[in-house]
Image (cartoon, helix red, strand yellow):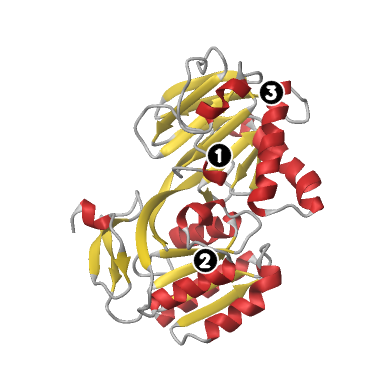
């Protein structure tokens, strides 16, 4: 199939087949995503403890039960994920649907890569069942949880709905101290940590969640960076190399962003740097000059004339990043403490998945 055909819209009744990249370190060069003319079997894996699922899981389970080709499993603990995936594999599902937040998606896709429960790479459908749903918002089924699930189930049965498949890489984060690899679509440090703590302490506690709460937390964090507020600006010395080239050499940074997504929460794109590779990174110094004036460019993937390295702005793409710092990394909502003395943290592509955008 041509590249133009891949980017087109596919109905569930269409027959389509094309090669899909698998793991970068796999001996197998490609696998096939097959959308058959028959009904597609869907395995829905729900995190029972995710934000929206605590209130809507019973309704989702009842909805799934109406469709004989939909299998639903709810897990309450991370150790149950592999068993659920193996059960889906034994039942021969065609599509793996993940119902949870960013952390749930990262955990499940990491298990798929590390444990390989399926004989071939399956297409992924994301349902927005978490408190933080950045990945599902960018790559998943549109709408609220129940509306999105209904749209997916109807489409899989040959009903109305168009699907636009999107291939995206998953970050793999390897730690020098031997702990398990972490996976995700986003890694942040510095003000990302302080902003997250502010959101939990001040925003979520007041009932503001989803995009509204996120917008408040992001705005407050940016204002804190602009004012040099120590609650948001806690500089950490960072050394970062990208594909062997040192881009930050032990210098203080206030914010670190790394992602394989084209856009982040609320549609922002804080990456403007050049270079080849799917990993996009941005580093802001402790006092980036003219921050407020630069925001329209900073948040839309463009560089203004004021956004220079000397002014505290760095952005670059690459295949592999190495990070050395003392502090906390936020990887799709999961926090990991790291120390420079332990050795560098290596961030690369763990694998690529096909996401069904409905």
Where disc 1 sits, the SS reads: loop
Residue displayed at 33% across by 54% down: 26
Query: Badge 1: few (under 14), some or many (20 or more) residues near its Cα, within 10 Å?
Result: some
Label 3 sits on a secondary structure element that is: helix
Q: Position of residue 46 (x, y in %)?
A: 58, 70
| Mark found first going from the N terminus, 2 or 3 | 2
Counting from the top left corner in percent of width and height, residue 182 is at 55, 49
Choose mark 3 or mark 1, whichever is in front: 3
Q: Is any atom of residue 327 visible in this view?
A: no
Q: Among all residues in the image, which is located at the extreme top? A: 310
Which residue lies under the disc numbered 1?
176
Say if 3 sits above or below 73 in the image.
Answer: above
The residue indicated by pointer 3 is 226
* Residue 275 located left or right of residue 45: left
Q: Tell me if I can see residue 211 in this picture.
A: yes
Q: Residue at x 36, y 64 (%)?
A: 163
Q: Residues within 10 Å of mark 2 (few under 14, many from 20)?
A: many
**Residue 19: image x %, image y %?**
24, 59
- Between marks 2 and 1, how big is the CA–CA gap? 30 Å
- Disc 2 versus disc 3: nearer the observer: 3
Query: Which residue is the extreme one toward the left?
Result: 2
Report the disc number at residue 98: 2
Q: Nearer the viewer, mark 2 or mark 1?
A: 2
Above or below, 210 against 152 in this view is above
Residue 223 in the figure: left or right of residue 288: right
Q: Secondary structure at mark 2?
A: strand
Determine which quarter of the picture holds residue 77: bottom right
């Amino acid at each position: 199939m041509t590249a133009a055909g891949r980017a087109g819209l596919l109905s569930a009744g269409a027959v389509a087949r094309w090669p899909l990249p698998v793991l970068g370190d796999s001996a197998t060069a490609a696998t096939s995503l097959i959308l058959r003319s028959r009904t597609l079997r869907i395995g829905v894996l729900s995190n029972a403890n995710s934000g929206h699922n605590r209130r809507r899981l019973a309704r989702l389970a009842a909805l799934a039960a109406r469709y004989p080709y939909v299998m639903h499993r709810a897990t309450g603990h991370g150790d149950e994920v592999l068993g659920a995936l193996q059960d889906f594999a034994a039942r021969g599902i065609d599509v793996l649907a993940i119902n949870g937040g960013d952390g749930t998606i990262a955990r499940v896709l990491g298990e798929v890569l590390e444990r390989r429960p399926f004989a071939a790479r399956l297409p992924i459908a994301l349902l927005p069942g978490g408190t933080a749903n950045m990945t599902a918002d960018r790559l998943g089924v549109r709408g609220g949880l129940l509306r999105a699930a209904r749209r997916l189930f109807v489409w899989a049965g040959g009903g109305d709905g168009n699907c636009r498949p999107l291939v995206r890489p998953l970050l793999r984060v390897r730690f020098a101290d031997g702990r398990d690899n972490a996976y995700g679509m986003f890694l942040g440090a510095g003000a990302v940590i302080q902003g997250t703590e502010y959101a939990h302490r001040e925003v979520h506690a007041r009932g503001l969640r989803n995009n509204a709460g996120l917008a408040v937390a992001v705005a407050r964090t940016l204002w804190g960076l602009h004012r040099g507020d120590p609650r948001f600006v806690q500089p950490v010395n960072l050394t970062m190399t990208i594909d062997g080239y040192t881009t930050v050499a032990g210098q203080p940074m206030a914010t670190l962003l790394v992602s394989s997504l084209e856009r982040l929460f609320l549609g922002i794109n804080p990456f403007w740097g050049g270079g080849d590779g799917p990993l996009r990174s941005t580093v802001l110094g402790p006092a980036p000059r003219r921050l407020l004036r630069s925001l329209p460019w900073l948040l839309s993937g463009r560089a203004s004339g004021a956004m220079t390295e000397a002014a505290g702005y760095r952005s670059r793409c690459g295949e592999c990043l190495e990070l050395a710092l003392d502090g906390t990394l936020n990887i799709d909502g999961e926090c990991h403490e790291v120390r420079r003395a332990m050795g560098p943290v290596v961030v690369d592509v763990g694998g690529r998945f096909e996401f069904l955008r409905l």
